[in-house]
Amino acid sequence: MDYLIYSLPRCGSAWLANFLTYDVSFCYHEPLADGTQFKPAKVMPITGAIDTSAYRTCVRAPRMFALTRNYDDIQDSLHRLTPFHSTEDFDLFESQTKDLITFHYENLFTVEYLSVIWKLIVGTPFPRHRAELLVEMNVQRDLDALVRRVGRAHGVT
């Protein structure tokens, strides 16, 4: 594995994994989720992973990053799904990621920020048009707006 991004749930890890899976790059999402030993295949020239449990087991890779979000926002988002993290989880995440380059959920939906992430992780020419499309269609941010836009495009109001 060329890189690993530690993350907490509800920080945009699935979205970022999708963004980083393009051209010469492949990014596994949650490869440790099933609890088995993960042995990634070299799928593409640049192969990495984003995982929300790797920080607990201290999984390592040659290049490591972190993806984070305001903890209150994580708790609010998780509360709608299931109770999950305790303060100890946040403290452990912070201690495991304190020296890593950290990406922030709040900035993931700007093309210029994605350009920085792409250059740091992949290093090939930035796929600007694809980034613009992914930012535009971000279903995590506003699903209702997306449904309305698709409806209008198909003549449904």
Image (tube, rainbow, N blue to C red):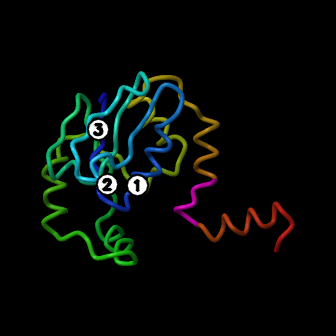
**Which residue occupies 54% across, 28% down?**
23
Q: Main secondary structure of the magenta part?
A: loop
Q: Nearer the viewer, residue 81 or 99?
A: 81
The disc placed on residue 68 is 2
Q: Quadrant of residue 82?
A: bottom left
Is 53 colored magenta in this rendering?
A: no
Question: Callout 3 environment at 10 Å: few (<14), some (14 to 19), or many (20+)?
Answer: many
Q: Residue 104's x, y, as percent?
A: 37, 51
Q: Does the residue at mark 2 contact the one at mark 1 (Cβ under 8 Å)?
A: yes
Quarter holding residue 122: top left
Residue 31, how many percent across, how many down?
32, 45
Residues in magenta?
Answer: 137-142
The secondary structure type at the circle numbered 3 is strand
Q: Which mark is residue 4?
A: 3
Q: Which residue is located at x 13 percent, y 52 percent?
A: 95
Question: How many marks do you count on the picture?
Answer: 3
To which quarter of the image does residue 10 belong?
Answer: bottom left
Q: Residues within 10 Å of mark 1 (few under 14, many from 20)?
A: some
